[in-house]
Image (cartoon, rainbow, N blue to C red):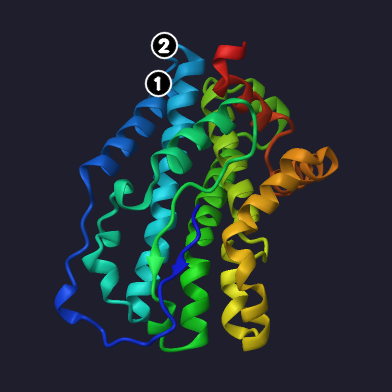
Amino acid sequence: MGFPGQRSNTRTSPNWGATRQYKISPVFLGIVAVTITGGAALWFGYGSVGIATFLFVLGGYFTVLCLHEFGHAYMAHRAGDRDIAARGYLDLNPMRYMNPLLSIILPIFYLAIGGLPLPGGAVLVNRAAARSKWQASMISAAGPLMNVVFAGLAMLAVGLATPNDFAWSNSPHASFWAGLSFFAWIQVAVAVLNLIPVPGLDGYGIIEPFLRYETRRGLEPIRPYGILLVLLLLVAIPPVRDGFSNAIDSILTFFGQPAGVSGVGGYNFRFWQN
């Protein structure tokens, strides 16, 4: 999750000399390794189901978070922002995207207490470098698209492997499928949250290039507080929070997730409460 900033309104010449090859950082590979370890432990029934689910889901969350921010950076680079490479955003290094409090501590805390996943990172992009409105729009769309893709893959796998409640509950890998379905729930929630068209969120960034200048200028003061306003509504107003959660559940049901399977995964994830 993340919300790319607008660096400048002044078009600059591409800095071709700053372009570097794409890299995959050891930190990212370590996060992927944690995810695979947790998933393998669930699949083979090794160790604690709760701890394995926690590692699998949380590792997957941060893996997609990195890819979300990389999506923003990649599209900005393709659109003409050559400073992206110089700032290291193309290295798949989560340390480039993350703030310790906003990106690690708070997301883990909110997920741990059963809350909604928070935005975890951000890349600073120069939208003025984009050569068209559609390219500027795609810079914002590329991040949530990563969440949508991984949510779709997870739901497809669960739906094919456990097409009904009987198949899921009797599967020898039921804990794995429950964890994967909870991971899908989180990714759907992140995608929907990011796509709300409020300044500061990716949903607004997608439509912003097509708005009139006066509209953009009038909404600009809201940008630093947009995500806070949305989260305040979700946390402080129970009908809004419950409506959001029910909407996510409905999406999972529509895409063939057995009833309650993501809830079991969430229960296993919060193993210290069991």
Residue in front for this viewpoint, 43 or 205: 205
Left or right: 150 in relation to 168: left
| x and y percentages locating residue 61 in the rendered image | 47, 40
**Quarter occupied by the C terminus:** top right
In the displayed structure, would residue 159 be above or below residue 14? above
Element marked by disc 2 = loop
Determine the residue positioned at 47% across, 88% down: 132
Residue in front for this viewpoint, 173 or 154: 154
The image's mark for residue 47 is 2
Left or right: 37 in relation to 222: left
Q: Of all residues shown, which one is farthest toward the left?
A: 17
| x and y percentages locating residue 219 in the rendered image | 66, 73
Determine the residue positioned at 59% across, 54% down: 191
Q: Amino acid at mark 1?
A: Ala
Q: Which residue is mark 1?
A: 41
Q: Earlier in the sequence, mark 1 or mark 2?
A: 1
Q: Quadrant of residue 44?
A: top left
Left or right: 53 in relation to 218: left
| x and y percentages locating residue 152 in the rendered image | 56, 51
Residue 50 seen: yes
Q: Quadrant of residue 10?
A: bottom left
Marks 1 and 2 sit apart, C-alpha to C-alpha, by 7 Å
